[in-house]
Image: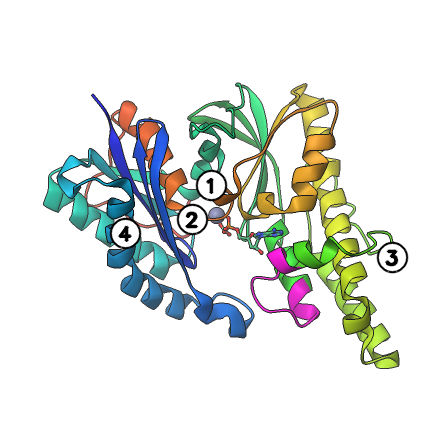
């Protein structure tokens, strides 16, 4: 019998609902929140309110796109964390009510696990990695090198001790006066710039952990100095600045990723999370001759309901169900 999971993602600023039919996706609808652009970052209070407004229309749209009726849903999956608490509460409460109204099981999903399991959505453009593999999960809130030995077994080999990679992109963009989220804009401008034009300091952290806060400070001081001499400096050099900043972030990411793969002797390497949409990162991974690279479809990189539905599907197969007292957890850990 077919299994149909409705997955709800509301951990940050995107309200997204995905519907899976076994291990395929038959709907993935996202309402982005433009409201945060002018604030230079996500405003938690506004995000929760926008989720409240969006959630019913997005669920309706996903059911329409999938051409299914609510009574055909086998289980409702939802992101319980990590994320912004007010945002998580909207999805959590909605999922509980929907599961109860339909009389179907409720499945709790860890957002970071879902980014990784997006690789297991069956479609013609992607083949899943084989176990064990290394996943570099790079998002707005997390940067982790994870050893994945099964759908449910993870070991974090390294992670950021301060800012996440996506945060480094967004903060650098903000310093240059670009709107939030700056990551995709840096990616766009970088394509026309010289990555060697400017150099920024790189962290000297032992082991497999990352640090990105020093880079932000290095960019800030450099630009303050240059803008004092020439107020048009950023405008005149935007492409080169973006290309150089992007290259520095990718150099930092790859250095530890290469070390990790060598240490555990694994050459199956996947990327996941919002920053895995970055064209420079995707290209560099594809060109890495020693690795079998796994790159998610663009729509499964940034936050999406499809990854919640597919994770819900694998947990459903294990009969791993939540109950109605399950709490949203802002700081939920992967392991
Ligand atoms: O996974 P995600 O959608 O949300 C979180 O779980 O945080 O990741 C969002 C992050 C933001 O920091 C955004 O700037 C970054 O992913 N991002 C990118 C690109 N697209 C999204 N960063 C660099 N290049 C991109 N093309
Ligand atoms: Zn995410």
- Nearer-N-terminus badge (2/1): 2
- From this view, report whether residue 87 is shown above or below residue 149: below
Q: State the SS at label 1.
A: helix
- Of mark 4 and mark 2, the one earlier in the sequence is 4
Q: Is residue 102 above or below residue 41?
A: above
- Label 4 vs label 3: CA separation? 46 Å
Q: Is residue 334 visible?
A: no
Q: Tell me which label, 3 or 2, sits earlier in the chain.
A: 2
For label 1, being within 8 Å of ligand 2 is answered: yes
Q: Is residue 225 magenta?
A: no
Residue under the point 72% across and 49% down = 249
Rendered residue at 43%/56% (across/down): 12
Residue matched to label 3? 197
Q: Label 2 crowding class (10 Å Cα cut-off): few <14, some 14-19, many 20+?
A: many
Span colored in magenta: 173-185
The mark closer to the camera, 1 or 3, is: 3
85 shown above or below 154: below
SS of the residue under disc 3: loop
Q: What residue sits right under mark 2 in the picture?
A: 82
- Distance, label 4 to label 1, CA atoms, is 25 Å
The CA distance from mark 3 to mark 2 is 37 Å
Q: Nearer the viewer, residue 112 or 306?
A: 306
């Amino acid at each position: 019998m077919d299994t149909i999971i409705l997955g709800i993602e509301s951990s940050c600023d995107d309200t997204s609902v995905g519907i899976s039919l076994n291990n395929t996706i038959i709907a993935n609808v996202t309402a982005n929140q433009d409201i945060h652009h002018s604030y230079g970052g996500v405003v938690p209070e506004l995000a929760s309110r926008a989720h409240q407004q969006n959630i019913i229309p997005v669920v309706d749209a996903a059911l329409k796109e999938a051409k299914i009726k609510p009574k055909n849903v086998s289980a409702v999956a939802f992101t319980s964390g990590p994320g912004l608490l007010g945002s998580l509460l909207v999805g959590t409460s909605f999922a509980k009510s929907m599961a109860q109204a339909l009389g179907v099981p409720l499945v709790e999903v860890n957002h970071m696990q879902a980014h990784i399991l997006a690789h297991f959505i069956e479609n013609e453009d992607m083949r899943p990695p084989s176990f064990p593999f290394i996943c570099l999960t790079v998002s707005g809130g997390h940067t982790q090198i994870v050893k994945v030995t099964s759908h449910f077994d993870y070991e974090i080999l390294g992670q950021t001790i301060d800012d996440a990679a996506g945060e480094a992109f967004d903060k650098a963009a903000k310093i240059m006066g670009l709107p939030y989220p700056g990551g995709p804009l840096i990616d766009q401008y970088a394509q026309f710039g010289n990555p060697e034009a400017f150099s920024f300091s790189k962290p000297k952290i032992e082991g497999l952990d990352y640090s990105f806060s020093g880079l932000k400070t290095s960019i800030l001081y450099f630009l303050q100095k240059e803008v004092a001499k020439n107020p048009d400096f950023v405008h005149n050099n935007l492409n080169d600045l973006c290309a150089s900043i992007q290259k520095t972030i990718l150099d930092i990411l790859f250095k530890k990723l290469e070390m990790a793969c060598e240490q555990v002797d694994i050459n199956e390497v996947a990327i996941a999370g919002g920053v895995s949409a970055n064209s420079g990162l995707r290209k560099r991974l594809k060109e890495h001759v020693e690795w079998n690279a796994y790159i998610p479809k663009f729509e499964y990189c940034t936050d999406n309901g499809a990854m919640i539905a597919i994770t819900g599907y694998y947990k459903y197969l294990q009969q791993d169900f939540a109950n109605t007292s399950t709490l949203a957890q802002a700081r939920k850990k992967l392991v």
